[in-house]
Image (spheres, coloured by chain):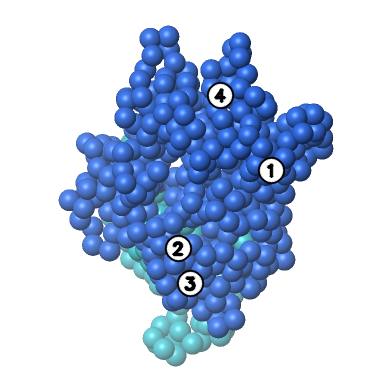
């Protein structure tokens, strides 16, 4: 059952957004703080009502200001993971999960806690759990409601980087089990790119761009709204070996890649995020270069970037690497669409934060 | 030792607590989470008994509930007895006089609950009543208990308003605080001392038990 959302308001912030999320799809609402993305999530959950809005799941209206339909939050089958988790502090993890069930069932609670990797921690209270564990309880509680829509409000913002990486992998793995539409609110483009199928970029309450993650990440206007320095391409890859010198050898559609210290065993599938500003282009295959990762492709298109920069999309098979270079450099290389070109990726430029582990699962990836 | 007076005081305190418990929960919660324009006025009215001399409040209650007032006449017509100078009248006065003691601590208790926790309860499918029972009361209860203990102890000790509205009718409106005053007037210092000591013991023990309980709850949640 698809989730359909339309919301218009003039106060407290201007809002004019409409989108649709298919079952099993993860849509990221991306924007700066104050852009209205959390307000949209609250509208879906029923915690806020804009002047004009329609929210429906599988055609059944939860909110329709025109028809005077407005179900209270507890009548909407929605799972909401709050930014600060909002766990019930007087209940154990298992009780928190059961609190969201129609009929509290300890066995089912345990199963859901297993699903989010909290085996054996059901008896702990939130105060006795780490930030990452609390986030997992919040996800488990949201799932225990058997929601028709799952809403995640910046669910990774309150944990440290290493925990966040692990939680990303868990969410990706979990998605194989989820059949409902999922909406993720985030200001982190990296996060959206790793997790989302589609993205809606919001600025000042307006939809700047909506489309698949790849489409949005290739849109210069959308990127400007998100901060162009974040522009990056995503490549799927498989860990081949941990080399003795501390580098990890990965096999990507673009050929072999070498990254420092990817903590994953051989065979693990990962997604690598390559920042556009860390990619250098060359007409011919360069020799005598210190960089380890050089891949050959063709120029798919050249898009104007911000100021003196241009964005060169390099097609490598079915995948793309994006290079952000100056217009002057592009002119000097006389790059045209279809030209063969070599992309040089400095191996050190791929940060740990930008590698998401994908569990071996046919649906994820 | 005037056992009748002590019994009357305890009954008055119990009735006051029983009536103010739901009031403190509903009004305290309402004032904690709702914002409306006349909120400062409502809060001021609730606070008023705290700053007014009991005699002033007692005077107005006497005027509003007395035989010549509309409420007093209605009461007389319905029940055939007058509201003032009766135990019932005392309960009414005590409830009004204890409003700040019952509402403010409960309001603080509900205010301490993060708004997201309340919203999470709704998003977990809990109706407002169920959320109150399963989430809000378990978290706010130290505040509510404090409110009830203060109300109880304060009722035992109240003097001025009881004298104004109730007079000093043995077995009907003569509370232990008034009995102590009576004994002192009659130079019976010994009886006054015993009753005072009993009152102190009851008050200290109820308050101590509450503090111990809320300290334990605080430890469990942090």
From the image, state whether disc 3 or disc 2 is nearer to you.
2
Q: Mark 1 points at which residue?
A: A337
Return the residue found at the far left.
A107
The picture places residue B118, in percent across and down from the top left corner, at 45, 55
The picture places residue A24, in percent across and down from the top left corner, at 39, 58
Chain identifier of the blue chain: A
Q: Which of A8 and A320 is in front in this view?
A: A320
Q: Which disc is residue A22 wearing?
A: 2
Q: Which disc is residue A294 wearing?
A: 4
Q: How far apart are marks 4 and 1 (CA)?
A: 20 Å
Report in which chain the residue with disc 2 lies.
A
Q: Distance between the residues labelled 3 and 2?
A: 12 Å
Report in which chain the residue with disc 3 lies.
A
Quadrant position of the C terminus of chain A in the picture: top left
Q: Can see residue B99?
A: no
Relative side of B216 to B57, left or right: left
Report in which chain the residue with disc 4 lies.
A
| Mark before the other along the chain sequence, 3 or 2 | 2
Residue depicted at 64% across the width and 46% down the height: A218
Residue depicted at 56% across the width and 48% down the height: A214
Q: How far apart are marks 2 and 1 (CA)?
A: 35 Å
Label 1 neighbourhood size at 10 Å, few (<14), some (14-19), many (20+)? few
Disc 3 element: strand
Instruction: State the image quarter where residue A288 is shown.
Output: top right
| Mark before the other along the chain sequence, 4 or 1 | 4
Q: Distance between the residues labelled 4 and 2?
A: 38 Å
Label 3 neighbourhood size at 10 Å, few (<14), some (14-19), many (20+)? some
Q: Distance between the residues labelled 1 and 3?
A: 44 Å
Chain identifier of the cyan chain: B
From the image, state whether disc 3 or disc 4 is nearer to you.
4
Relative side of A288 to A306, left or right: left
| Mark before the other along the chain sequence, 4 or 2 | 2
């Amino acid at each position: 059952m698809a989730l359909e959302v339309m919301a218009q308001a003039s106060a407290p912030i201007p809002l004019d957004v409409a989108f649709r999320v298919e079952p099993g799809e993860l849509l990221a609402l991306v924007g700066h703080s104050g852009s209205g993305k959390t307000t949209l999530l609250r509208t879906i959950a029923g915690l806020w009502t804009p002047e004009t809005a329609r929210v429906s799941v599988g055609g059944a209206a939860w909110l329709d200001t025109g028809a005077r339909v407005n179900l209270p939050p507890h009548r909407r089958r929605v799972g909401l993971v709050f930014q600060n988790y909002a766990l019930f502090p007087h209940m154990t993890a298992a009780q928190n999960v059961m609190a969201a069930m129609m009929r509290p069932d300890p066995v089912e609670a345990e199963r859901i806690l297993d699903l989010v990797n909290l085996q054996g921690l059901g008896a702990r209270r939130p105060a006795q759990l780490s930030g990452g564990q609390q986030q997992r309880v919040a996800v488990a509680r949201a799932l225990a409601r058997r929601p028709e829509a799952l809403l995640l409000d910046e669910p990774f913002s309150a944990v440290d980087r290493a925990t966040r990486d692990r939680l990303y992998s868990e969410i990706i793995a979990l998605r194989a089990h989820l059949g409902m539409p999922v909406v993720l609110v985030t200001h982190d483009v990296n996060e959206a790119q790793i997790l989302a199928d589609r993205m809606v970029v919001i600025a000042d309450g307006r939809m700047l761009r909506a489309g698949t993650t790849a489409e949005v990440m290739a849109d210069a206007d959308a990127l400007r709204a998100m901060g162009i320095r974040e522009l990056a391409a995503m490549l799927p890859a498989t860990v081949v070996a941990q080399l003795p010198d501390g580098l990890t050898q990965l096999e990507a559609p673009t050929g072999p890649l070498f990254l420092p210290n990817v903590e994953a065993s051989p065979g693990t599938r990962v997604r690598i995020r390559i920042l556009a500003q860390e990619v250098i282009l060359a007409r011919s295959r360069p020799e005598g270069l210190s960089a380890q990762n050089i891949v050959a492709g063709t120029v798919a298109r050249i898009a104007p970037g911000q100021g003196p920069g241009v964005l060169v999309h390099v097609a490598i098979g079915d995948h793309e690497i994006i290079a952000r270079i100056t217009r002057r450099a592009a002119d000097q290389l006389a790059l045209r669409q279809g030209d063969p070109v070599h992309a040089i990726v400095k191996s050190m430029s791929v940060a740990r934060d930008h590698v998401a582990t994908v569990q071996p699962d046919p649906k994820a990836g | 030792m005037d056992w009748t007076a002590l019994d009357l005081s305890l009954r008055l305190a119990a009735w006051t607590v029983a009536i103010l418990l739901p009031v403190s929960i509903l009004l305290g919660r309402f004032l904690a989470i709702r914002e409306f324009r006349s909120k400062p006025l409502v809060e001021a009215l609730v606070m008023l008994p705290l700053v007014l001399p009991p005699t002033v409040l007692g005077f107005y209650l006497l005027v509003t509930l007395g035989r010549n007032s509309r409420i007093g006449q209605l009461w007389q017509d319905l029940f055939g007895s007058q509201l003032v100078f009766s135990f019932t009248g005392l309960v009414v006065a005590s409830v009004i006089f204890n409003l700040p003691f019952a509402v403010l601590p409960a309001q603080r208790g509900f205010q301490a609950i993060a708004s997201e926790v309340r919203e999470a309860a709704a998003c977990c499918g809990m109706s407002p009543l169920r959320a109150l029972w399963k989430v809000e009361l378990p978290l706010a209860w130290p505040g509510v208990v404090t409110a009830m203990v203060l109300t109880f102890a304060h009722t035992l000790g109240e003097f001025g308003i009881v004298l104004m509205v109730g007079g000093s009718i043995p077995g009907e409106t003569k509370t232990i605080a008034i009995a102590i005053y009576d004994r002192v007037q009659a130079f019976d210092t010994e009886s006054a001392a015993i009753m005072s000591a009993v009152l102190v013991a009851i008050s200290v023990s109820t308050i101590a038990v509450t503090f111990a309980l809320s300290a334990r709850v605080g430890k469990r949640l942090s």
